Image: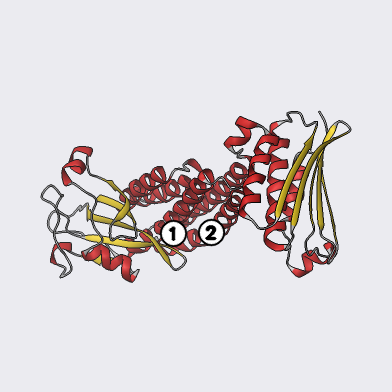
């Protein structure tokens, strides 16, 4: 396998691992742009995240020094080829950007760009960014190499990585900023589910990408299988990070104060009355406090969104050497034996997993028209 092929595959791996190594949007963008420039052997690379006002909310470049970037001036607008690429959501591969009729020029300090390759970054039907490269480094003594169809295919794979990484980082930042309990819980599950599903698709894409490498295909296939393995590892690491993430308020204030504050917010935000009482609760091990909080959030979410309850009551109390959390509502209720068949899992599997993960138990009492009570008990130390 050639050095170029090896370095290209290494760049794909690097972009994939950005998901698990970085959770800040800016760091993810920088890693993707640097990987794209290395992968396609280009002089310049950039990634823009559009705003809703004709500009870019974020714009990251690679191949331009800080001094050059400062001299260029404000972030670009969505015009010319960039606007067309975002609006029509299709790749743009040009032998000379300057000769395209849509070209509208650039600031005096801007580097000269010639051959150009750009792809939209898509999350489903939504265009969430644009990844583009310019000036492919040429080994020929005369003339421009230009970007090839194979380059476009490889950048397409990287654009899928970019969509995953951006979605992951955005969800992480949103979940960190939100303070309403049900939103924190929902986004944590959304983060896990979305990334797991996309990583599965990406493993298939990485395997299919062997068709793009026609030099020493056997070795290329081995390397791409390694990329698939790295994707699986990234999913495992991300899952562990989401499950173990403790909200800052829990660290600072403890379980009882955090739960009381969040329930007060929910009481104000919903028509149902939401109350909280606690009896003799002392500080618990961090893992138990995290699990109890997550179960309370999930149970509250279900009661307030799905049960039609007028009153939801949360009680925490000592039981022997342990602690019991009980969330009761006067809503519609359901038959617990038919939940799985009906597809209304209501987060019960997740709650049971959280309880068992800290050595606890979860019980569910409900019947149609009789309301629901969810109880979690954790053992004492």
Left/right of residue 190 with respect to residue 345 in the rendered view: left
Residue in the picture at 59% in, 50% down: 188
Q: Residue at x 47, y 66 (%)?
A: 124
Q: Is residue 120 left or right of residue 219?
A: left
Real-space CA distance between mark 1 and mark 2, rounded to the nearest whole angstrom: 9 Å
Residue 121 picture location, percent across and down = 39, 60
Q: Position of residue 34 (x, y in %)?
A: 33, 46
Q: How many marks?
A: 2
Q: Quadrant of the C terminus?
A: top right
Residue 358 picture quarter: top right
Camera-nearest residue between 116 and 175 = 175
Q: Is residue 41 visible?
A: no
Outermost residue to the left: 108
Q: Nearer the viewer, residue 162 or 265?
A: 265
User: Element under label 1?
Assistant: helix
Residue 322 image point, x, y percent: 84, 34
Q: Which residue is mark 2?
A: 198
Q: How is the image coloured?
A: secondary structure
The residue sitting at 74% across, 62% down in the picture is 307
Callouts 1 and 2 close, C-beta under 8 Å:
yes
- Residue at image position (76%, 69%) is 342
Q: Which residue is mark 1?
A: 160
């Amino acid at each position: 396998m050639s050095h170029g092929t090896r370095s290209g595959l290494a760049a794909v791996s690097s972009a994939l691992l950005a998901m698990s190594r970085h959770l800040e949007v800016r760091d993810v963008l920088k890693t993707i742009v640097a990987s794209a420039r290395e992968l396609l052997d280009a002089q310049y690379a950039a990634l823009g995240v559009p705003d809703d006002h004709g500009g870019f909310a974020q714009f990251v470049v690679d191949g331009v020094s800080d001094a050059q970037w400062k001299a260029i001036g404000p972030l670009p607008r969505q015009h010319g080829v960039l606007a067309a690429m975002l609006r029509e959501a299709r790749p743009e591969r040009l032998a000379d950007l300057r000769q395209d009729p849509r070209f509208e020029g650039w600031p005096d300090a801007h580097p000269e760009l010639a051959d150009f390759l750009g792809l939209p970054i898509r999350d489903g039907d939504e265009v969430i960014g644009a990844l583009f490269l310019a000036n492919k480094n040429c080994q020929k003594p005369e003339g421009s190499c230009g970007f090839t169809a194979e380059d476009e295919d490889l950048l397409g794979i990287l654009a899928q990585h970019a969509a995953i990484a951006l979605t992951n980082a955005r969800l992480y930042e949103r979940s960190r900023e939100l303070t309403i309990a049900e939103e924190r819980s929902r986004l944590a599950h959304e983060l896990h589910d979305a990334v797991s599903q996309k990583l599965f698709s990406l493993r298939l894409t990485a395997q299919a990408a062997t068709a793009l490498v026609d030099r020493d295909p056997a070795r290329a296939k081995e390397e791409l299988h390694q990329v698939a393995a790295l994707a699986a590892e990234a999913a495992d690491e991300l899952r562990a990070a989401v499950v173990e993430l403790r909200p800052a308020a829990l660290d600072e204030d403890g379980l009882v104060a955090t739960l009381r504050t969040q329930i007060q917010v929910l009481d104000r935000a919903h028509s149902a009355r939401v109350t909280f009482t606690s009896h003799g609760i002392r500080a618990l091990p961090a893992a138990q406090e995290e699990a109890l909080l997550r179960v309370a959030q999930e149970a509250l979410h279900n009661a307030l969104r799905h049960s039609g309850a007028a009153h939801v009551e949360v009680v925490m109390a000592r039981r022997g050497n342990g602690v019991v959390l009980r969330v009761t509502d006067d809503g519609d209720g359901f038959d617990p034996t038919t939940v799985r068949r009906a597809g209304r899992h209501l987060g019960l599997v997740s709650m049971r997993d959280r309880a068992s993960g800290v050595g606890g138990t979860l019980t569910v009492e409900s019947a149609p028209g009789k309301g629901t009570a969810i109880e979690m008990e954790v053992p004492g130390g």
